Image (tube, grey):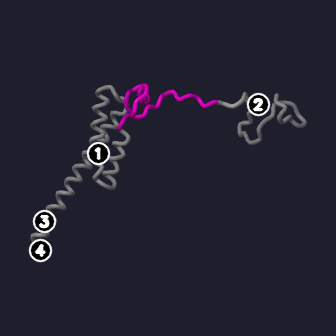
Amino acid sequence: MSDLNPPTGGSGPVVDPDDTWGRPLTPTVHTGPQRAAEPAIEIVGPGGGGEPSAAPGGYSRRSLATPAVACSIAALVCCGLTGPIGMVLGALDMRAIDAGVTDPSQRGRARTAFILGAVATILLAVVVGLSLVLGSMSMMRAS
């Protein structure tokens, strides 16, 4: 089969000892320097210069659902300031899905981001409102 590592004392194909499946070695043929494959999608900068890069699935824009969910979850977990951002990104992505610009399989994620962002925004408003009310009450008692 291959004369790179001839078998010692037996007949049959050379088997790689590190291969757990015991498959025979196949010789690798090098035909010279390999060129990198050309990208399937042309990347265009803000100055233009060709066709715009396409989002996966043939849609003209990438989905904002993943960053929207990240902002919404971050708002619920640590800081409520990113809640409105997640809510707006989720709403924008749902609008883009309705217009056929973004992949419709991301609708559930965009809706989740909108709902979580709305909950985080409401909680932020309640906390800010309570702190203002309680702060003003403590200032009235001090004077």
Closer to the chain start, of discs 3 and 2, is: 2
Q: Check residue 136 in the rendering and tell me which mark sits there, or answer none.
A: 3
- Residue behind mark 2: 27
Gap in angstroms between the C-alphas marked 1 and 3: 29 Å
Disc 4 from disc 1: Cα separation: 38 Å
Dividing the picture into quarters, in which one does residue 19 lie?
top right
- Magenta-colored span: 35-64
Q: Residue at x 31, y 51 (%)?
A: 75
Image height of 24 relative to 88, above or below? above
Residue 85 — which label?
Answer: 1
Question: Residue 139 versus residue 44: which sits nearer the camera?
Answer: 44
Looking at numbered disc 3 in the image, what kind of residue is underneath it?
Ser
Secondary element type, mark 3: helix
Residue at 83% of width from left, 34% of height from top?
4
Looking at the image, is mark 1 or mark 2 earlier in the sequence?
A: 2
Q: Is residue 58 above or below residue 118?
A: above
**First-in-chain label (1 vs 3):** 1
Majority secondary structure in the magenta region? loop
Between marks 2 and 4, how big is the CA–CA gap? 87 Å
For disc 2, the neighbor class at 10 Å (few under 14, some 14 to 19, many from 20) is few
Is the residue marked by circle 4 packed among few (<14), some (14-19), or many (20+) residues within 10 Å?
A: few
Q: Which residue is mark 4?
A: 142
Residue 95, position in %: x, y?
A: 27, 32
Q: Confirm whether the magenta stretch covers residue 41.
A: yes
> Which mark is first along the chain, 1 or 4?
1
Rendered view: 117 above or below 137? above
Tag 4: residue type? Answer: Ala
Establish if 116 lies above or below 12.
below
